[in-house]
Image (cartoon, grey):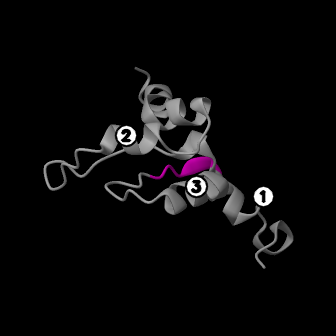
């Protein structure tokens, strides 16, 4: 509904959101949620996180490794995005 013509912006607000916001599905190990976030935002805007010390799930690595995502998507989420954003 908020078109560029109405807002005076060059893009839709949702486009700015997708370009500038990064998500961390911290501590929520739901395949359905992870797949939805990848479809919604793209794997290049998801940072893998765990709410340590409040959550210390033992299957953190296995959850991402065994997901249906491609190897490239898994690497972006696991470390690639953080390395790019934080310049490490």
Q: Residues within 10 Å of mark 3 (few under 14, many from 20)?
A: some
Q: Position of residue 47 (x, y in %)?
A: 44, 43
Per the image, the residue denoted by label 3 is 35
Extreme residue toward the top, this view:
88
Q: Which mark is residue 22?
A: none
> Who's the residue at 37% across and 40% down the image?
62
Q: What is the secondary structure assignment of the residue under circle 1?
A: loop
Residues at marks 1 and 2, CA–CA distance in whole angstroms: 38 Å
Is 22 a magenta residue? yes
Magenta range is: 19-23
Dot 1 or dot 2, earlier in sequence: 1
Per the image, the residue denoted by label 2 is 62
Is 79 a magenta residue? no
Looking at the rendered image, the quarter that the N terminus falls into is: bottom right
Extreme residue toward the bottom, this view:
1
Please, is residue 49 above or below residue 86 in the view? Answer: below
Towards the viewer: 20 or 51: 51
* Horizontal side, residue 38 vs residue 64: left or right: right
Residues at marks 3 and 2, CA–CA distance in whole angstroms: 16 Å
Please, is residue 59 above or below residue 54 in the view? Answer: above
């Amino acid at each position: 509904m908020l078109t560029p013509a109405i807002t005076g912006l060059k893009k839709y607000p949702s486009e700015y959101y997708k370009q500038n916001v990064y998500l961390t599905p911290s501590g929520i190990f739901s395949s359905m949620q992870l797949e939805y976030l990848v479809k919604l935002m793209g794997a290049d805007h998801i940072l893998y996180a765990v709410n340590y010390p409040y959550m210390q799930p033992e299957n953190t690595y296995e959850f991402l490794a065994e997901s249906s995502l491609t190897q490239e998507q898994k690497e972006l989420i696991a470390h690639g995005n953080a390395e790019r954003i934080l310049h490490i």
